[in-house]
């Protein structure tokens, strides 16, 4: 078992690494906000270009088709006022501006600082749990690819290939560093996991469709599960599916009880898969150990 900070490091260097992890997480979280807002718009523009290509019509030529992660510069989504660099400091700017745009004074979506805090939490928990080790690097890479994927799925029901397939490739490559602890699984287990994860979800979805006549999951969910099982190996699949199903059902129950769930509304499964996968990577052995201890099963 990898030593956690509490066990393995002297207090001084432990705090240093936690500080580095927290600040790095906040900075990357700020960029992840850009990805969450712009990637679906970039995908939409790409589909319009492809449709124009197929139908032989002129491709659309408005500003929306030129949106990228780098352009246009950050602006208030409500009044279009440009943001100055000091409006872009993670969390601090939101607090200093009391959650309102500097120009129009309308409320800024609280998700922006929340995403920055979640990214910081991913980095902090990884270093807290694994210490400043290759395993923490693996947990950070996986967590920071899953965070934007989960947020985009929750908002748009899309799971961009550029995130799910990046997480899959990252998992396969990380398994090459298994001997150093970057991934907890060998390359053979990563490849088998990816194939099993995709196939299992495909079979589940087909079964659900045959029984209910409704579409339960999308291909994005298959690719995401393939990615997660590339990081956790085939044996991680039951834990991921069990945790994700429990979390998804609990979220549905909360929405239903609060009266915000109607027949047209459905819950994206991707965020729960992503959360379950990251928890599995971080705490899988502990969770399985607690389960076997509680049930007496081996
Ligand atoms: Zn504004």
Image (cartoon, rainbow, N blue to C red):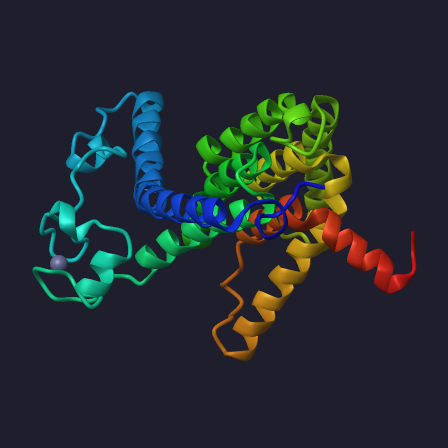
Residue 55 picture quarter:
top left
Residue 235 picture quarter:
top right
In the image, residue 150 sits, relative to residue 190, either above or below, namely below
- Total label count? 0
**Image spot of residue 255 (x, y percent):** 52, 72
| Quadrant where the N terminus is found in the figure | top right
Residue drawn 50% across the image and 63% down it = 265
**Image spot of residue 75 (x, y percent):** 15, 48
In the image, residue 272 sits, relative to residue 3, either above or below, namely below
Whether residue 208 is visible to the viewer of this picture, yes or no, is no
**Image spot of residue 200 (x, y percent):** 73, 39
Horizontal side of 147 relative to 59 (left or right) equals right
**Image spot of residue 84 (x, y percent):** 11, 47
In the image, residue 13 sits, relative to residue 121, either above or below, namely above
Residue drawn 16% across the image and 34% down it = 62
Horizontal side of 89 relative to 167 (left or right) equals left
Q: Report the image quarter containing ligand 1.
A: bottom left
């Amino acid at each position: 078992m990898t030593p956690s900070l509490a066990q393995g490091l002297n207090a001084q260097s432990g705090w240093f690494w936690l500080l580095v992890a927290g600040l790095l997480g906040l900075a990357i979280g700020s960029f992840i906000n850009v990805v969450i807002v712009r990637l679906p718009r970039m995908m939409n523009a790409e589909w319009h270009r492809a449709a124009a290509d197929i139908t032989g019509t002129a491709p659309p030529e408005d500003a929306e088709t030129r949106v990228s992660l780098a352009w246009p510069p950050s602006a208030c989504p409500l009044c279009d006022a440009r943001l100055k660099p000091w409006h872009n400091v993670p969390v601090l700017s939101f607090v200093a501006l009391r959650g309102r745009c500097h120009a129009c004074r309308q409320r800024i979506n609280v998700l922006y600082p929340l995403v920055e805090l979640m990214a910081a939490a991913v980095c902090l928990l990884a270093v807290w749990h694994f210490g400043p080790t290759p395993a923490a690097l693996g947990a950070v890479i996986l967590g920071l690819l899953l965070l934007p994927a989960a947020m985009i799925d929750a908002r748009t029901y899309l799971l961009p290939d550029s995130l799910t397939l990046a997480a899959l490739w990252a998992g396969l490559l990380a398994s090459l560093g298994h001997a150093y602890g970057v991934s907890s699984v060998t390359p053979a287990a990563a490849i088998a996991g990816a194939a099993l994860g995709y196939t299992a979800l495909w079979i589940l979805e087909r079964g659900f469709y045959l029984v209910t006549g409704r579409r339960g999951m999308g291909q994005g969910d298959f690719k995401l599960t393939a990615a997660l099982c590339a990081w956790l190996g085939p044996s991680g699949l039951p834990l991921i599916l069990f945790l994700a199903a429990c979390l998804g059902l609990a979220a549905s129950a909360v929405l239903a009880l609060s009266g915000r769930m109607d027949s047209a509304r459905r819950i994206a499964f991707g965020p729960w898969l992503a959360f379950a996968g990251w928890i599995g990577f971080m705490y899988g052995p502990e969770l399985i150990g607690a389960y076997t201890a509680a049930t007496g099963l081996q």
